[in-house]
Structures are given as C-alpha cells and as structure tokens.
Image (tube, rainbow, N blue to C red):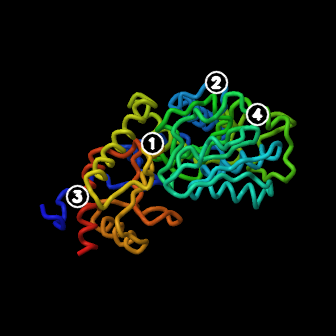
Amino acid sequence: MTENTKPQTVPARPFFSSGPCAKPPGYSLDKLATESLGRSHRAKIGKNRLGYCIDLMREMLQLPDTHRIGIVPGSDTGAFEMAMWTMLGARPVTTLAWESFGEGWVTDVAKQLNLDPTIIRADYGHLPDLAQVDWSNDVLFTWNGTTSGVRVPNGDWIPADREGLSFADATSAVFAYDIPWDKIDVATFSWQKVLGGEGAHGVLILGPRAVERLENHTPAWPLPKVFRLMSKGKLAEGVFKGETINTPSMLAVEDAIFALEWAKGLGGLEGLKARASANAAALNAIVESRDWLGHLCADEANRSKTSVCLTVEGADADFIKKFAGLLEAEGAAYDIAGYRDAPAGLRIWCGATVETADIEALGPWLDWAYASLKA
C-alpha cells in the first residue's frame, strides 16, 4: 500500500470519542432490563435497581466499606460542584490545573466561591510539581486530565496524615487505574467515560473525613436543593442507598448496570485495566512508528492510558478539523479531534469499552488522512 492509498478495512467500532465514550462490546438496547421503566424511582423496584447499581460500582471499584457512594445530578461536573459547594470554606484551598477541567474548578473556587485559592498550574502536556502542594489545605485535582492526556502517576504524593481533604475529579480514571482510596476523601465521576454509559448522572464518593467535614461545617453561601447532602444536621444517608436527590433516569441506570455487569464478566477492575492498557499500548505502537505523530504528554509515567492526546506535525486547528472530518466521512473514526481549548491535535479514547483490534485498524487510516491533507 502506498502512503496515500485508502485502507480497505475500517475499525469495526470506530467510536473513539472521549465522552460520551464507546458502549461496551455487544451492547444493544434490547439487552437492557426495562421493568423499572415507567415506575417511580422511589418504588421498591426503583430503589432496588439503584441500590444494585451502587453495589456493582462498589464491587468494580474495589471501594472499601469506609467510603460511601451515591448517584447525583449533573454528571461529573454536578458531583464535583456538589462537593465543593458543601465542603469548601473550612480551610484554605489549593487547586491544581493542567488542562481545561482543572481550570474549571479554579474558576469555581476563585470566582464563584471567592475563596482566593492557591493555584498550581502546568501547561497542557505537563504535570505540576506535586511536591509544592501544602496539605494543610483542601486540595482539588483531576486524577486523569481528559483534555491533556496527563494524569497523576499514583497517590504517593498524598500524605496519609494530611490535614486538608483531597478532592479527586476521577471521571477518566476510575475503572482504568488503581485508586488508593485511603488517600481520597472525595472522588467524582460519570458513567459516560470508562463504562461507556449515558450522561446527566454523576457519582459522588465520600470517605469518612469528608463526612466529618459535612457534619461539622456549614458553608457561608446558600446551597441549591440538588446540592444538599445534610438533613437535620446529619448526612442524608439515603442518598448513598439509592434515594437520589432528584429524579434519575432509570433507563440510564439500567444502561450503567449493563456496563457494570459486562465489566464483572471480564473479571472486574483487573479486566477493565488490562483492556485499557492493551489499547494504550496499541496506540503507542502506532505513534512510535510514525515520525509525524507524537504524544502531547512526553513523560510516559504521567501519560493517560484512557484519553490519549496526540500531536500532529505541522497541524493547526483547521488541519485537525479537516483530518477528523475525513475519517468521520469514511466511517473510520468518530470524534478524534482534540479538545477545543487544548493545543491542536488528536484525542483518541483507549478505555476498556474500545477493542484493541479497532485501535490497530486505525493506524493506516491516520496515515491516509495525513497524506491526503499534505498532498
């Protein structure tokens, strides 16, 4: 095949979007349980399915009994803002930002809550100096920077005897990495990432120190109803047993249950991690064999294995838009242009719901699109 010959084989499932992400292999709507649809989420069947979803998430995450897990409104954003609005203000705050979502939390803390945080930044493709963090503060960070392809390497930088709370936006990290839950006081994610679930619902995980903060700290600002986790001075425990604050989509819950049962069939967390690792390795092999492709995150220790962000030699935003458009028109890859605020490049999801064979089949198509635009 010459460099600009169109490949004959397209990926069987060309869904490489970084959110919402590919559905699990074998997914179809007719495989979802529907008995809870059209029923009240507060009826026994609704509560049971919500509770079952929470139990499956706990099992798949290997979450210890010390941590509560609840389904909340507003996707990962809603879950993280719920945590900020209810718990911040008791201590000084440090915010880490090396991509757009981390910058969003900086804006919330500085401009909405007016808390004058310490801000530790790094450019796209780099991780801030984690040794700078003062853990007498509450600390906010993204475990895996979805729009930069940069993650924290582990939890070793978080001290066991920290005074402040650790708040981890882990939406692209859970189900793909080992999360040291003893180092995490608050974590949030959404089903639409590594599980390939539907949007609009967030998941909030609280460790015991976060619960203690909620029960001993009253925020200085008013709280919308959808953020209220306290009832009569105590944690609203029902939220963490399937009694959601607002009405959930039971169809989205059944969709998440399907994905979680699929994950359990793979061997749980270990199976999900192995699939993501294989996908990231396959994409890295493509990158290393092409001198016009590179990783936005040069440091492999900090490189995401889910939201992998790539540089393209000589590319600007217009080039990338045309590049992604060519592949979409051919049904070879959907939604692989980098995030709008990130440096011009590609972003290819390598989470567990993607098949490694489809990553491998993508390589020749990347060659074809690049050669076509450079011709």
Disc 4 to disc 1, C-alpha distance: 44 Å
Q: Residue at x 26, y 49 (%)?
A: 360
For mark 1, what is the residue? 32
Rendering coords of residue 290 (x, y %): 26, 56
Q: Residue at x 87, y 50 (%)?
A: 220
Label disc, if present, on residue 79 of the rendered structure: none
The amino acid type of the residue labelled 4 equals: Glu
Quadrant assignment, res 51: top right
Q: Which residue is mark 3?
A: 364
What's the distance in space between the residues labelled 4 and 2, CA to CA? 22 Å
User: Mark 2: which amino acid?
Assistant: Asp
Look at the image and tell me whether residue 203 can be seen: no
Q: Is 217 placed left or right of 280 in the picture? A: right
What residue is at 75 percent from the left and 42 percent from the top?
137
The residue type indicated by label 1 comes to Leu
Query: Disc 4 marks which residue?
Result: 163
Q: How far across and down, in percent of the image, does residue 168 sit? A: 62, 42
Q: Secondary structure at mark 2?
A: loop
Against 115, residue 242 (above or below) is above
Q: Secondary structure at mark 3?
A: helix
Quarter placement of the N terminus: bottom left
Residues marked 3 and 4 touching at CB (< 8 Å)? no
